[in-house]
Amino acid sequence: MSDWNSQVEAAKKELAAEFKNLDDKTRILKSDHLKKLYALLPKVPAEQKRELGLAINDLKKEVESWLKDDNEKKVEDLRPIDLTAPFDINAKEPSLLPAQNGSIHPISQEIEKVSEIFNSIGFEIFESRNLDDAWHMFTSLNFPEDHPARDDYDTFVTEEELVAPAHTSTMQSRILSLRKSDLEEGRPIAGVVPDRVYRNEDVDARHEHTFHQLEGVYVDKDVNVGNLIATLKTFLSAYYGKEVETRINPFYFPFTEPSFEFALSCPFCDKKGCHICSQSGWIELLGCGMIHPNVLEMAGIDSKKYSGFAFGCGIERLIMMKYGVEDVRLFHSAKLKFLKQF
Ligand code: PHE
């Protein structure tokens, strides 16, 4: 037997072993063992070339038959498909898995938590509305007619001159009127409104046209700024589960006097300054102040006898600070990867 004969035999054994171990069986056709045999061809004496060529070809055909057998076996291995089955229990692809039950949206989950905290310190929960009139949205809140402060809110207005509330303060006067009898009975008015608001503004990582606010209203005898700050700090520590660092700055709202802006130390950079807090180390969280006497009077409450505070907080921002969410648009993006984290 010629030398190449034993080489072909040896290559066949090597190929069989290699084939067994291959994940992608088709790669066997590119095996070095085959290449080496082809490389023999130019080296053998001319009269043996044909014989060697045929032997290599036979071997190649045999290898191809291994491939064919393997494919047939794979087809046999496939389980029969039940077309009436609603889904494939063993599917590895998520799209073939059974549909999962829906879950509560993170904003709703957080609103639930926020409401529970305020409930636990005696606040009643109210709902806002999706359409309101300019009287509640502006006039009842001491915005003079045609005052430019009305424009600050970039409101959506319908043809009938109704407005999509741009803040939950649109509910202030209603809560005051509805609960003013409590004051005469010696109880404070204490309400919060966690609900949706709308602003006709450009959307970016920190602004949405549709978002949520948490309004708070509290009225009693001798209420002062200290009560406002204590309430907000109590709430924020409960919500964030730790003492939070806050900063209060004077501000202007027509419906509160004095008015403040309340900021929280930036949790993203620990006050060092980053792109999220515009390098300031602080993030404005809410507007607040002592309810303007005109607002109390318009709701039928004697402003000489009673005083109160109000605040309005962006709920998305509250959540973003808690979980380190950098882009407000994610909440309405329907991205399951984001939503499932909550
Ligand atoms: N409504 C105000 C806003 O949306 C916030 C606010 C509420 C300020 C209550 C003071 C009191 O900007």
Image (cartoon, rainbow, N blue to C red):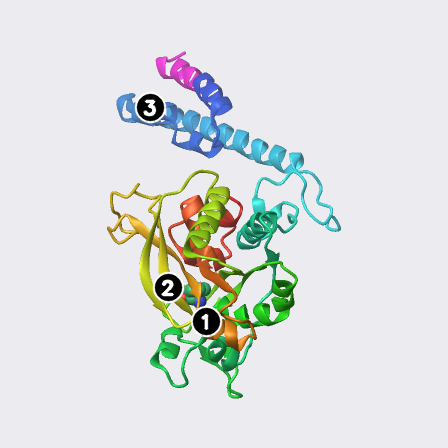
Mark 2, Cα crowd under 10 Å, few <14 / some 14-19 / many 20+, is: many
- Asked whether mark 1 lies closer than 8 Å to ligand 1, one says no
Mark nearer the N terminus (3 vs 1): 3
Q: Which residue is mark 1?
A: 293
**Magenta residues, start to end:** 1-11
- Asked whether mark 2 lies closer than 8 Å to ligand 1, one says yes
Mark nearer the N terminus (2 vs 3): 3
- The residue under the point 44% across, 57% down is 224
- Asked whether mark 3 lies closer than 8 Å to ligand 1, one says no
Mark 3 or mark 1: which is in front? 1
The image quadrant of residue 73 is top right
Res 205 seen here: no
Q: Which residue is mark 3?
A: 36
Mark 2 or mark 3: which is in front? 2
Q: Out of 29 and 157, give the one closest to the viewer.
A: 157
Q: Which is the main secondary structure of the residues drawn in magenta?
A: helix
In the picture shown, does residue 50 fall above or below 225?
above
Q: Out of 298 and 68, give the one closest to the viewer.
A: 298
Q: Can you give x and y, in whole percent of width and height, for residue 267 in the image?
A: 35, 43
In the picture shown, does residue 125 fall above or below 166?
above
Type of residue at label 2? Ser
User: Is 220 left, or right, of 248 in this rendering?
Assistant: right
Q: Can you give x and y, in whole percent of width and height, for residue 255 in the image?
A: 43, 71
Kindly report the distance in space between the C-alpha atoms of the residues bearing marks 2 and 3.
87 Å
Q: Which residue is mark 2?
A: 259
User: Is 289 left, or right, of 212 in this rendering?
Assistant: left
